[in-house]
Image (cartoon, rainbow, N blue to C red):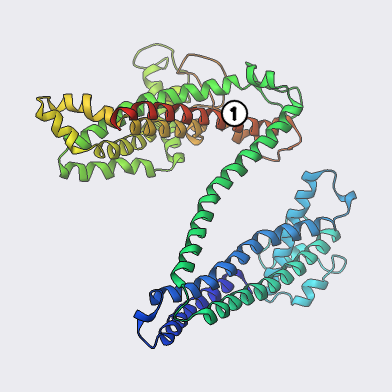
């Protein structure tokens, strides 16, 4: 039974449990809810949660654990002489999964029976041709070891699915029976339901923390492996970025960090003034009709995919800048040799960041108490003086947060940089030259069949860890600024 149908059955059982639990509680009170400890709905919620929480919890854990267990078991069946390293073994396992899924599809479409799929042999049947007839494309002929492993994979998966269905449904039925039998007029259903909901809220909050910890640990472990293979002094202080998977790489981060900083600085120089001025206009000067039209229109920019911005940089902004600053351009000087440059990516990225700054700043400015504006105007200040000396200082902590969000977004941007700034890693002050960033090189180092035993692949994790530390430092600095200025208004 598939996980979908298990979920449907559990949800249906929970719905039935709600109705029956509520009815049992009312029956125990003689039909008068005033004799119940809790409201009738809480008794229904108690039965539903007793069905849902343990059953769905087991289902989720099983869905995570079963593929891992089966994968490890099947790997032991692959002869060691058929592969040379972990990368080759992973490629074989991908073929095993593809063949196993193909056999399942062939059984589903009637091309094979379940018994035939479990007993078919490469010596008597062309597996590639047989699976190709049902739409499963294989790159090469199926080896005997791969087919045997795929058949074991299918068998283990089918057994695991059967056990999963039995255990999850049994646990749901047990929870239903236990909660239903406990239901009576004196049962403290509200207390139990609220404790369960509180536990669920704590668990949901913990997921974000644990996810962050997991991301950091994965970066740390791989970064440590990288620095075992490559000296940290050359990584942090090297002036050349020239990776070569054949050996002899120069992996200095300074050119990448400079490109990231330079492009982000230009983007913020575009986004912060425009976004902040737009926010001030929308919150302080615009009429309700104009605001209702302009604010959603401005926020549409935030919903445009970054690849579209990258194409805009490549096809529109870059050629426009070349037409002005190129050799044959309007200024008649050779400042810009091609459309991919720091200025191209910075301008387009700044346009992308405008809604981040304007929308957040607008909400923050609107949150400033109207009494502060009225007090300033009552003392004789003009509207512009009130905005400059009262509203903006009061909203400064939130505005700093908005700018920080925009900066983090700029540092982590990839597609605009790839299409608009080029791929050259260099140290230069010329904004009309092509450069690249840390995120763009992380993508390039992990593209293709990367060997994670080499420093050229592991350097991506060191780059990511460095970027994480820089962003964390920006957050700490912004938090310090927020607390420093907030004290004036508390």
**Would you identify the image quadrant in which residue 254 lies?**
top right
Residue 154 lies, in percent from the top left, at: 75, 67
In front here: 338 or 10? 10
Tell me the quadrant of the picture where the N terminus can be found. bottom right
| Residue depicted at 46% across the width and 83% down the height | 20
Q: Which residue is mark 1?
A: 466
Residue 49 lies, in percent from the top left, at: 51, 70
In front here: 137 or 429? 429
Q: Is residue 109 visible?
A: no
Q: Secondary structure at mark 1?
A: helix
Picture layout, residue 157 above or below residue 384: below
| Residue depicted at 16% across the width and 44% down the height | 288
**Would you identify the image quadrant in which residue 438 lies?**
top right
Residue 338 lies, in percent from the top left, at: 47, 22
Q: Label 1 neighbourhood size at 10 Å, few (<14), some (14-19), many (20+)?
A: some
Tell me the quadrant of the picture where the C terminus can be found. top left
- Please state if 91 lies on the left or on the right of 478 as rendered: right
Residue 152 lies, in percent from the top left, at: 80, 66
| Residue depicted at 46% across the width and 72% down the height | 189
In front here: 358 or 84? 358
């Amino acid at each position: 039974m598939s996980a979908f149908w298990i979920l449907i059955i559990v949800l249906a059982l929970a719905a039935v449990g709600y109705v029956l639990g509520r009815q049992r509680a009312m029956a125990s009170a003689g039909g008068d809810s005033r004799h119940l400890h809790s409201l009738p709905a809480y008794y229904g919620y108690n039965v539903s949660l007793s069905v849902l929480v343990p059953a769905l919890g087991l289902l989720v854990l099983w869905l995570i654990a079963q593929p891992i267990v089966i994968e490890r078991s099947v790997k032991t069946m692959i002869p060691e002489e058929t592969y040379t390293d972990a990368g080759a073994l992973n490629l074989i396992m991908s073929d095993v999964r593809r063949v196993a899924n193909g056999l399942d599809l062939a059984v589903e479409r009637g091309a094979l029976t379940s018994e035939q799929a479990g007993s078919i042999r490469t010596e008597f049947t062309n597996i590639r041709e047989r699976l190709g007839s049902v739409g499963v494309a294989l790159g090469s002929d199926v080896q005997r070891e791969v087919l045997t492993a795929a058949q074991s994979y299918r068998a283990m998966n089918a057994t695991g699915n059967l056990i999963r269905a039995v255990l999850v449904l049994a646990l749901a039925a047990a929870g239903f029976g236990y909660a239903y039998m406990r239901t009576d007029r004196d049962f403290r259903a509200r207390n139990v339901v609220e404790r369960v909901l509180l536990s669920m809220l704590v668990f949901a909050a913990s997921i974000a923390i644990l996810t962050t910890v997991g991301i950091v640990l994965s970066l740390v472990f791989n970064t440590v492996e990288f620095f075992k293979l490559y000296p940290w002094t050359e990584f942090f202080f090297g002036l050349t970025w020239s990776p070569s998977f054949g050996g002899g790489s120069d992996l200095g981060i300074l050119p990448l960090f400079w490109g990231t900083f330079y492009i982000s600085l230009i983007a913020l120089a575009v986004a912060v003034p425009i976004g902040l001025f737009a926010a001030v206009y929308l919150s302080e000067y615009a009429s309700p009709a104009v605001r209702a039209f302009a604010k959603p229109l401005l926020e549409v920019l935030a919903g445009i995919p970054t690849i579209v911005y990258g194409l805009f940089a490549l096809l529109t902004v870059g050629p426009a800048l070349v037409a002005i600053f190129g050799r044959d351009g309007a200024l008649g000087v050779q400042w810009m040799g091609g459309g991919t440059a720091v200025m191209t990516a910075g301008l387009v990225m700044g346009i992308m960041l405008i809604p981040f700054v304007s929308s957040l700043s607008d909400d923050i400015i609107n949150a400033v108490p109207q009494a502060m504006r009225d007090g300033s105007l009552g003392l004789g200040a003009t509207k512009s003086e009130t905005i400059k000396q009262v509203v903006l200082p009061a909203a400064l902590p939130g505005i700093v947060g908005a700018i920080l969000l925009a900066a983090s977004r700029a540092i982590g941007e990839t597609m605009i940089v790839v299409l608009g700034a080029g791929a050259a890693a260099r140290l230069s002050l010329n904004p009309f030259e092509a450069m690249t960033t840390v995120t763009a090189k992380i993508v390039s180092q992990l593209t293709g069949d990367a060997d994670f035993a080499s420093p050229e692949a592991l350097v991506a994790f060191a780059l990511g860890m460095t970027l994480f530390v820089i962003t964390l430092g920006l957050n700490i600095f912004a938090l310090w600024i927020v607390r420093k200025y907030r004290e004036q208004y508390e």
